[in-house]
Image (tube, rainbow, N blue to C red):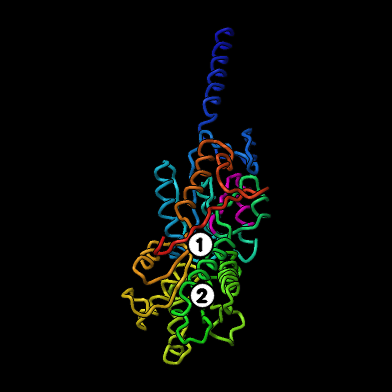
Amino acid sequence: MKRTLALILAALFLLTALAACGNNGTNETPSAEPAVSSAESAEPASSAPETEGTDLNVAVFYYNFSDVYISSVRNILDKKLTDAGITFQNYDGASNQAQQTEQITTAITNGANLLIVNIVETSSDDAAQNAVDAAEAAGIPIIFFNREVSDAVVSSYDLCAFVGTDAPEAGHMQGALIGEYLMANYDAVDLNGDGEISYVMFKGQEGNAEAEARTQYGVEDADAVLTAAGKPALVFYDSKNPDKYLVDQTGNWSAQASNDYMNTILAEYSEAGGNMIELVICNNDGMAEGAISALQDAGYNLGDGGKAIPVFGVDATDTAKQLIDEGKMTGTIKQDAEGMADTITVLVQNIQGGSALMDNTSAYNVDDGVAKIRVPYDTYTKEG
C-alpha cells in the first residue's frame, strides 16, 4: 500500500513539473533589461530588446494629421508596416503636447512594444525626454522622426534613435535656389524697378529647429548670391517688423495662416502703390499653397503666363509639385517622405527580427556618435 501511494505521489509531482515547464516562452514581453546585441556596426551601438516569441505592437504618434508633409509620411509608413505584417496604431497629437504625452502613456499601458514618435513640442527637451523615460521604464524601443530632438535625448537610452533631416540643409538649399532664380530674372521680379527685391517670409513655428534654419538660411544664402553679384540684399516688406518673418501662431505651419497674412498684406501692398511684395519665401509647401491662393484671388500666379510673384517652399508635396508644373509656384526643396518612411521601416524591421535598433544602416547618413539618421533633401523646379 505504501509503495502504491509513493508511486502516485511521484507521478503527481512529475505532471506538475511538466505543466510548469510548458508555460515558459509562450507569452514573453520585452524585458526591462534588454539584451545587448552582439552585432558589430559602424553606427552607434544599440541594444536589441527581447522580441523572440513576441509580435510587434507598434504605436505611431504624429504631431498633427493635418500637416500635408506628415500626411504623406503617414500614408507611406502605413503601407510599409502593413506589407511587413506589423500591427500598428496611429495617434493624432493635434499639435497638443499634453494630449500626445497622454497617448504615449495609454499606448504603453495597452501593450505597445515599440514607439514611433513625431514629437509635438520641440522648443525644449522635456517632452521628448519624458517619452524616452516612459519607453525605457517599459523596456521598449522608441524611434523619433522628422521633428528634431537633441543628441542628449537620443543618447540617454540605448533603444532610442532619430530619423530626420539635416535642418540647416533645407534652408541653405532654398536660399541658393532663390538666389539663382533672382539672378536669372531680376528685372522681371523687381516690379517697381527700385533695384531691390521686397520679400515676405512665412515661418512655421517658433523654436522648431527646421523652422529656425529655413527662416535664417533661406534669406541669408539668397543674399549671399545677390551681393556676390553686386546686387543689394533682400528687403523685408515691412520695415517696422524687427523679426523679418510672419509666424503661424498655432505652430501648425498651415496654409490658412499664410493665406490670412497674405490677404492682409495685399489689402495694403500693390503694384499700383509701388510697394508690391515681389518674393514669397515659405518654411513649407502648405504655407506656400496658402500664399498662392491669396495671390490668385488678386489675379497673380494663375499659370496662364500673366502676372506672377515667385513663391518658394519646402517639402515637394504632390500639390506643390503640381503647382510648380503648372507655372503657379516657382520651386521647392524636396523633403523625402518616402525616404523618411523607408528608413523608419528599416529600424522597425530590425526590432521585428531581433536585431539591434541601428543594424543595417551602414549605407545611411548617420551622425557621428549618436543614433541619428539624416535623409537628404533635393530641389524641385519646373525645369527639374
- In-image side of 78 versus 302 (left or right): right
Image quarter in which the C terminus is found: bottom left
Secondary structure under the numbered disc 1 in the rendered image: loop
Provide residue 43's location: percent of width, then percent of height: 63, 43
Q: Is residue 21 above or below residue 38?
A: above
Q: Is 145 one of the magenta-colored residues? A: yes
184 or 15, nearer to the observer: 184
Identify the residue at horizontal 44%, vertical 80% (top origin): 260
Q: Quadrant of residue 120?
A: bottom right
Could you tell me which residue is drawn at 49 percent across and 71 percent down?
282
Image: magenta residue range: 129-146
- Say how many tags the image has: 2
Q: Residue 63 shows which numbered tag?
A: 1
Which of disc 1 and disc 2 is earlier in sequence? 1
Q: Which mark is residue 202?
A: 2
Task: Judge from the rendering whether residue 333 lies leftward or rightward of residue 359; answer left or right.
Answer: left
The N terminus is located in which quarter? top right
On the image, the x and y values in percent for residue 312 come to: 47, 70
Front-most of residues 46 and 200: 200
Q: Nearer the viewer, mark 2 or mark 1?
A: 2
Q: Position of residue 110 (x, y in %)?
A: 50, 49
Q: Is residue 321 left or right of residue 111?
A: left
From what the image shows, is residue 67 above or below residue 362? Answer: below
Residue drawn at (34%, 79%) of the image: 306
Identified by mark 1, the residue type is Tyr
Instruction: Tell me if residue 333 can be seen.
Output: yes
Give, as a three-letter code, the residue at label 2. Answer: Phe
Instruction: Pick out the residue farthest to the left.
Output: 304
- The CA distance from mark 2 to mark 1 is 20 Å
